[in-house]
Amino acid sequence: MIIVEKRDGREEEFIPEKIVVSCLKAGAPVDVARKIAKIIEGRLLEANKERVTAKELTKMILELLKKENEEWYRNWIVFDRAVKRRRTEEELKE
């Protein structure tokens, strides 16, 4: 099992479906959203990761989303800023 360390310090089990939902919210079609979730899950398993931070996951998701479609990437950034009050792009440069 892979544990995700959330931004507020809480921990939860890695659930690929959460990536799918987030990608759908950004505008990606379900097949692309599932592909991105599978790629990330594969990377984590391949790296034998037992823990991953939410920030690391976001970085991986956005990298793949941007490759697929710049607009979906922008949608994610705008949503994070407007709804979650996060400066995702700036955070990922740290």
Image (tube, rainbow, N blue to C red):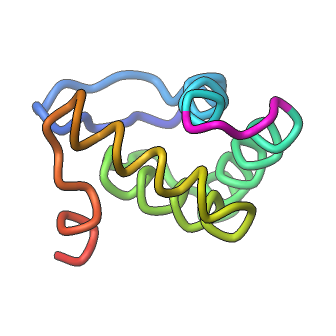
Q: Residue furthest right?
A: 31
Q: Verify whether residue 9 appears in magenta.
A: no
Which residue is drawn at the image coordinates 65% and 37% (left, top)? Answer: 27
Which residue is drawn at the image coordinates 37% and 51% (left, top)? Answer: 77
Q: Main secondary structure of the magenta part?
A: loop
Residue 79: percent from the left, percent from the top?
Answer: 35, 37
64 left or right, relative to 22:
right
Q: Quadrant of residue 15?
A: top right
Q: Residue furthest bottom?
A: 93
Quarter of the picture containing the N terminus is top right
Quarter of the picture containing the C terminus is bottom left
Compared with residue 70, is residue 30 higher up or lower down, i.e. above or below? above
38 left or right, relative to 72:
right
Front residue of 56/23: it is 23
Compared with residue 32, is residue 74 higher up or lower down, i.e. above or below? below
Which residue is drawn at the image coordinates 74% and 62% (left, top)? Answer: 68
Q: Which residues are magenta?
A: 26-30
Front residue of 31/47: it is 31
Q: Quadrant of residue 46?
A: bottom right
Front residue of 30/7: it is 30
Q: Quadrant of residue 76?
A: top left
Residue 49: percent from the left, percent from the top?
Answer: 51, 54
Compared with residue 78, is residue 60 higher up or lower down, i.e. above or below? below
Which residue is drawn at the image coordinates 82% and 44% (left, top)? Answer: 32
Residue 90: percent from the left, percent from the top?
Answer: 19, 68
Q: Count all numbered tags in the image, as a single digit.
A: 0
Front residue of 63/44: it is 63
